[in-house]
Every structure is written in C-alpha cells, then in structure tokens.
Image (cartoon, rainbow, N blue to C red):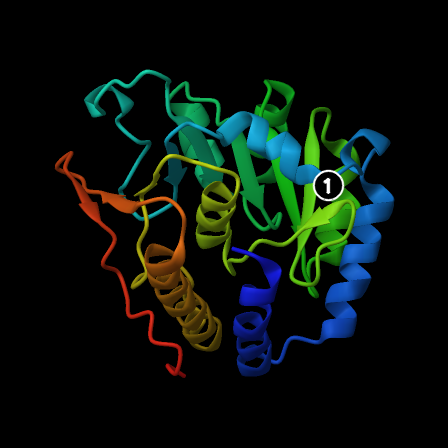
Amino acid sequence: MEYAQWAPRYARIREEFGFDLDHEAAAADLLERLLPPSARSDPLPRVRARVEGREAIIVGLAPNAGPPPLWRHPAGDRPPCLIAADGATATCLAAGLVPSVIVTDLDGPVASEIAANRRGSLVVVHAHGDNQPAVREWVPQFPGELAGSWAGEPRPGLLDVGGFTDGDRAAYLADHVGATRVVLWGFDFDHTAETDPAKRRRKLAKLDWARRLLAILAKEGRAPLLTWRPDGTLAPYEGGNAVESTR
C-alpha cells in the first residue's frame, strides 16, 4: 500500500491509542543512527529481491498453531517465501525453518531473531514511540542484513507501506513488494497471553485493528490474501470488516 493511502488510517490508530508522533519520530531517528551503513540504503528493493514473484507465507504466533506445515502445501515453480512475525521466528527455528524475512518491533524473543539473522534472514526492525530501549539494546547485536521501518512518511532508509502489528505489517509488506499471493498461518485476533486486565484490553484492541487492516488489504491489495487453516485448506481471508468508519 502506498503511504498516501495508509497515512489517514494510521492517524486514526494514533488518535485511538494516544501515540505521540514526536516519540515515534525520535525512535525512527534512533533506529536510523544505529542501523549499519549497509542497511541505510532503500530497504524496499532488498526486501523485494526475496519476495517478488513468490508466494509469501506470513507466520503468526497463535496459540497451538506451531510452525506452518510446508509439507502439506502444494508445490509450485518456486518455493514460498517464509516471513515470520516477531515471536513466530522461534517457532520456525524450532522446526528447522529459517524465515527469509522477519518483521519485528523487538518485543518478542529477540535472541531467536538474531540467530535467524545470522543464518540469512533479513530482519525488518520497526521503530515506534515506546520501543527505543529495545532498539538501542538489540539493533547493534544483529550480525546480518537489516532493514528499518517506522509509522510515518518513508525516509531513504526507513519504509512504511502500511500495517500496525507485526503480523499485518508483514502482510502489507509482502503485498507491496510483489508476492504472488499472501497466506496467513497462525493468526488469532481473539486471544492473548496477557493477564493484566488493562494491558489485555489494549492488546485485544490492537489485534482488532490488525483484523480489520487485513480486511482492507484483502480488498485493496495487489495479491490475493488467504488464510491457511489447520486442516490444510486455503480460503480467502474473512477475518474482519474493512469498512473505514469502524471505531
């Protein structure tokens, strides 16, 4: 999705959650400073080289989902591109799967993401207003290829093609860079492991946005958006309502 389409939607998200744009810009500035020189070039062509012309499987961290059963997936001319959303990286590695791309805001098991990065994963690190300590701690420790993103107007070294949480942001990215179709595995918008009541409500509100943003992508995206069900079947994404006036 182009930034001009995405910006009004994120403005509503920022208003609902009280995100401070100045804090987000400060996090983006920090990420840009910490990225190695090789990661400061336009990130989109580097992501596109891994995804374009391939099916993208976005791996989420739904309870009991486990890794995607690639052996059950129909073989194509080219193998699918595996894109892990943050904590799903550990699930993939435990099954012997190294994601081609990882999309993360560094609030999951970052050590697993560093291990995958060492083994060839391109890690797209997202900067937002309250993850500056994590950006400062972890970005210098990645040994492999990095790219940066943030929730504002794209910069030469930071992308923004839409999406809010790691999972839906990964789907928006795959669609933008030319995936033939985008397949969601391990997505659950109704449950969270958070036990604190206030944090739980906030997390579920974010997941609700993710659900609806994916519905928008299903309607407006360039590639078909599908859900890979536990029984092995694929179905068009039907996880939410794309109506713009919700909330």
Point out residue 230 in the picture as x, y percentages from the top left corner. Answer: 18, 39
Q: Quadrant of residue 82?
A: top left
Horizontally, is 128 left or right of 182 in the view? right
- Residue bearing mark 1: 138
Name the residue rendered at 75%, 55% in the picture: 133
Q: Bin the neighbour count of mark 1 within 10 Å (Cα to Cα): few under 14, some 14-19, many 20 and up.
A: some
Q: Indicate the position of residue 241 as horizontal and vertical percent values.
A: 29, 70
> Which amino acid type is marked by label 1?
Trp
In front here: 221 or 138? Answer: 221
Closer-to-camera residue (5/158): 5
Q: Give the vertical position of 8 relative to 117 (above or below).
A: below
Image x and y of residue 187, in percent = 32, 50
Q: Residue at x 77, y 59 (%)?
A: 27
Residue pictured at 53% horizontal, 39% vertical: 177
- Answer left or right for 21 relative to 229: right
Seen in the picture, residue 44 relative to 46 is either above or below; the reply is below
Residue 53 position within the rendered picture, expressed as x and y whole percent measured from the top left? 43, 28
Q: Is residue 102 left or right of residue 114?
A: left
On the rendered structure, is 17 left or right of 19?
Answer: left
